[in-house]
Image: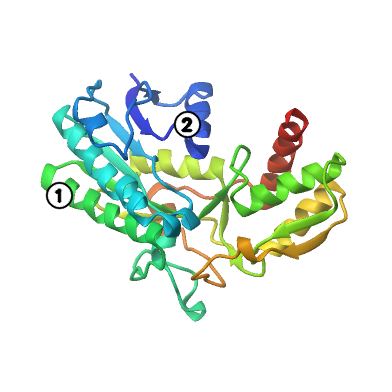
Amino acid sequence: MKKSLLVTGLNGFVGRHLRQRIESHDLPWSLLPHPAFDLAVPESLESWRCEVPDAVIHLAGQTFVPDSFLDPRRTFEVNFLGTLSLLQALKRNGFAGTFLYISSGDVYGQVPEATLPIHEEFLPHPRNPYAVSKLAAESLCLQWGISEGWRVLVARPFNHIGPGQKDSFVIASAARQIARMKQGLQAHRLEVGDIDVSRDFLDVQDVLSAYLRLLSHGEPGAVYNVCSGQEQKIRDLIELLADIAQVELEIVQDPARMRRAEQRRVCGSHARLRDATGWKPEITIKQSLRAILSDWESRVREE
């Protein structure tokens, strides 16, 4: 018999892929209806009633770092207070199962390059309101697990990519612009932010596999990095996208796209996740970029 799974944020980038994965594969989970509430409005959760799930994946939140600088209060209302409201609502509904909180690798903040890759034992030093809100919500969820006896786990995903991501994110933005160039809709001039940094990118399908394995095999109270374990320079990925599309372009850095508190290099370790669940990345960066570019080519044709 399948176990019931409640997922917040099903309409987001990762949520849509998770819904498709569960509905199209023979997995031991059945999705409950998407909850109709707004994390920024606690009142919308006060009267919320649901079938008590066996497990919850809390994906929903404010996920765009630049927006957290523009409106830090809303970021905290959604990511921290919204999580508290969800926990309270689940308790009222009689929940006592597995709760997987999706945090972010951004909580680590500035990490000396000599100490890379980043392990879960590293002390977080968040450098933006988004990361602070996620770290606070992590602590809240873990405390809730202790107080309520729930099986609570925390995932810290690093940068993840895949078809369907908003073009406010760097790889999606580059892919969209290159798709437009290929179709003659844009000059061969790519506007970017700081692309001479390296990041740890993981395909969204590998991210989903990690989350689902954590539901079944993760250790209660533990924190897990979800990452590829490899760093990729953003400039190299943009050039690879252009090669795949067979497009020649000029790269121009746009000051408006530059982000404050930028870590130059990021690379995580997924050893704890691998040891606990047997998970490992399966999709290469080139496969990911091909899928992203193909998706944007289709979307651009429909614009």
x, y percentage for residue 106? 44, 61
- The residue that disc 1 covers is 146
Q: Splitting the image into 4 quarters, where does residue 134 fall?
A: bottom left
The residue depicted at 22 percent of the width and 32 percent of the height is 43
- Circle 1 SS class: helix
Badge 2 density bin: few <14, some 14–19, many ≥20, Cα 10 Å: some
Image quadrant holding the C terminus, namely: top right
| Residue 85, visible in the rendered structure | yes
Image quadrant holding the N terminus, namely: top left
Front residue (pair 258, 265): 258
The residue depicted at 32 percent of the width and 52 percent of the height is 76
In the figure, is residue 257 to the left or right of 33?
right
As drawn, 66 above or below 266:
above
Q: How many marks?
A: 2
x, y percentage for residue 192? 69, 60
The residue depicted at 35 percent of the width and 49 percent of the height is 74
As drawn, 262 above or below 217:
below
- Circle 2 SS class: loop
Q: Which amino acid type corresponds to the residue marked 1 in the rendered image?
A: Ile
Q: Nearer the viewer, mark 1 or mark 2?
A: 2
- The residue that disc 2 covers is 11
In the figure, is residue 88 to the left or right of 66?
left
Q: Earlier in the sequence, mark 1 or mark 2?
A: 2
The residue depicted at 73 percent of the width and 58 percent of the height is 191
Badge 1 density bin: few <14, some 14–19, many ≥20, Cα 10 Å: few
Front residue (pair 213, 123): 123
- Which residue is farthest left? 147
Q: CA distance from mark 1 to mark 2?
A: 30 Å
Q: Splitting the image into 4 quarters, where does residue 83 fall?
A: top left
x, y percentage for residue 49? 22, 22
Q: Which amino acid type corresponds to the residue marked 2 in the rendered image?
A: Asn
Front residue (pair 300, 115): 300
